[in-house]
Amino acid sequence: MFELALDKVQIEEKQGEAFKPFADDINQYNKKFYIESYGCQMNFSDSEIVASILQNEGFGATKNYEEADLVLLNTCSIREKAEQTIRKRLTEFKKVKQAKPAMLVGVLGCMAERLKSKLLEEEKLVDIVVGPDAYRTLPVLIKEAETGQKSVNVLLSRDETYADISPVRLDSNGVTAFISIMRGCNNMCSFCVVPFTRGRERSRDAHSITNEAKQLFEQGYKEVTLLGQNVDSYYWMDEANDEVITFGKLLERVALINPSLRVRFSTSHPKDITDEVLLTMVKYENICDYIHLPLQSGSTRVLQLMNRTYTREWYKAKVNRIREIIPNCGISSDIIAGFCTEEEDDHLDTLSMMESSGYDMSYMFFYSERSGTLAARRFKDDVPEDVKKKRLKEIVELQGRLSYQSNQQDVGKTFKVLIEGNSKKSDTEWKGRNSQNKMIVFPKENYNYTIGDYVVIRVTDFTQATLIGEVIYQ
């Protein structure tokens, strides 16, 4: 779900823009840190790595940035709106810093590399700038910044995976957790900044991944999501056993930890997802029947300009193959409206592909040029904004209808649901997701269930974004 650029409109609520840490025995630490994360799930996962590094340096997490000694923003350069939001937050922190000069403010992640000079020198908004591959140097950078120096490390790495760092689970529900399995990206999609801000692709060793998943299960977690910019290109050589570990084999290793540990993954690239992965999903009930398969455009011509390396026909065949092997698989997508040179026929191709694929939900954007990308260098951003917005509106309306139809088809069906917490609307209802990643709410009543339990639910009603159900047995 984090492959993309741009201004986003959603049918289903995604994680909030800011990810703020909990305060856990804060008084046992000498100093306090506050962190917010923006953008993709990888950034949220990275914040947990940063929290672990800081905790080892005597920092404890706090929810109140005004009392923090160190304030960090883990940033995203995918969309212009995200950068605007971060600048606004930094301005707010600057006001607090005027009354508390010793407080340090730092920017982490993708925006750090892109805008380091402006943030440090021109606008004087931050003291520390750290790129995604340099988090281990944070302790040194903090010490430098404490002397009044501006500290920066945005060097990219060809081998850093943070495999030996045990993440501190921030603001966790104790049920679901992310596990980063790889970093960087080798796909040079012309609209995307990720290869330039996160570097080349490298896979984490499989033993550290399975060990982390085992530890999470032993701590009571019931679901893990394996994260990567393109998980299907995961590749690691197990030299001890002279075995190549593909993503399908990694999925199997994690699934075998325990049948009660659910396994999800994101994101898949249409050119790389294999039958091996699909057949592994079928083999293990605890691997969820859900795939996020970004389309971006339904036009082969536009896909070529995007450097997506597949055609309209290839994508359609891949969706058909998924449906053939996993008939009940949930499929979601990313879609861009108004990419460079897009014409009305290209837009209609996108709408028809959405219809054909029958997405359960999508993350929808209109194109926003990002400096440094191949598209910014090669193509003119020539689709008028009013046309982009019109096309996006049509995409959103179609996805709304598809989501409605998808949920309507689930009425009367039963699903195994993992309880994640209280419903947002009422503490008399539980919420949880089924294997297809659909959120289901249902009454607690007098059943003796709690967060982290599995329960079988019959769907009785629905909205465009949510299924509504009832417990069918205890």
Image (cartoon, rainbow, N blue to C red):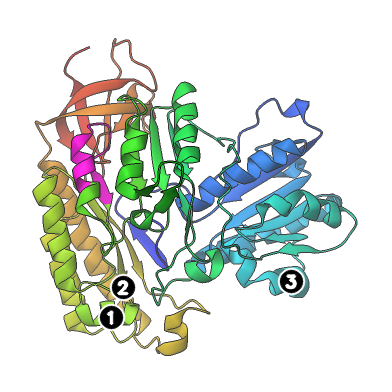
Choose mark 2 or mark 3, whichever is in front: 2
Q: At numbered mark 1, what does the secondary structure look like: helix, strand or loop? A: helix
Residue identifier under label 2? 308
Q: Quadrant of residue 252?
A: top left
Determine whether 18 is above or below 117 in the image: above
Q: Which residue is mark 1?
A: 304
Query: Height in image: 315 above or below 117?
Result: above
Q: CA–CA distance between discs 2 and 1?
A: 6 Å
Label 2, secondary structure: give it.
loop
Q: Residues within 10 Å of mark 2 (few under 14, many from 20)?
A: many
Q: Quadrant of residue 369?
A: bottom left
What's the amino acid at mark 1? Gln
Near-viewer residue (417 or 385) = 417
In the image: residue 328, left or right of residue 390:
left
Circle 3 is placed at which residue position? Answer: 123
* Residue depth check, mark 1 versus mark 3: number of the one nearer the observer: 1
Q: Is 102 left, or right, of 288 in this rendering?
A: right
What are the residue bounds of the magenta stretch? 278-291
